[in-house]
Image: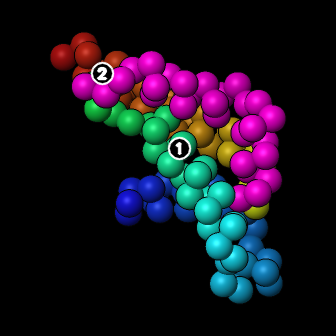
Amino acid sequence: MKKLKNLMVSYQRLRTSDDFKRPDPELKLWRAVLGLAAEDATKHKFGENRNMIDQARSWFLQPTSNFMTVCYYAGYDPGYIKYKMRKAIEKQERKENGKKDM
C-alpha cells in the first residue's frame, strides 16, 4: 500500500484551500480506484496474467470516457494522469525488457 501512495503522490494537482480539509469518502473511493488501476498497470511480476496488465496499461494510454469519469470524480486532471502514467509504464516496460534479456 505504501508503494501505491508513493505512486499517487506524483499525480496530485495543485493544492488549494479545499485540499487541507478532510476528503469526503466518495473522493477517497475514486482516488483508491485510480490508485489500484495505476498499481495494476505498473506490475512487474512475470507470473501475473499479462493480459490483465496490458488492459490496465491500455486504460491509461488510450483513455475512454470511463477513465475521464474516474479522474474527474477523483479530482485529477485526466491529461496529467495520462502523461504521468505513460512515463511510469514506459519505465516499467524498460525494467521488464531488461530482465528478459538477462
Q: Nearer the viewer, residue 1 or 82?
A: 1
Coordinates of residue 22 in the picture (x, y in percent): 66, 84
- Residue at x 60%, y 50% (from the top left corner): 34
Q: Earlier in the sequence, mark 1 or mark 2?
A: 1
The residue indicated by pointer 2 is 98
> Along the horizontal axis of the image, is 62 left or right of 49?
right
Q: Nearer the viewer, residue 54 or 66?
A: 66
Point out which mark residue 38 bears.
Answer: 1
Check whether the beta carbons of the residues at disc 1 and disc 2 lie within 8 A of each other: no
Image: 41 above or below 39: above
| Residue 79 in view (yes/no) | no
- Report the residue that reaches farthest toward the left: 102
Q: Nearer the viewer, residue 3 or 54?
A: 54
Task: Please name the predominant secondary structure of the magenta segment in the image.
Answer: helix
Coordinates of residue 8 in the picture (x, y in percent): 55, 57
Identify residue type, mark 1.
Ala
Point out which mark residue 94 bears.
Answer: none
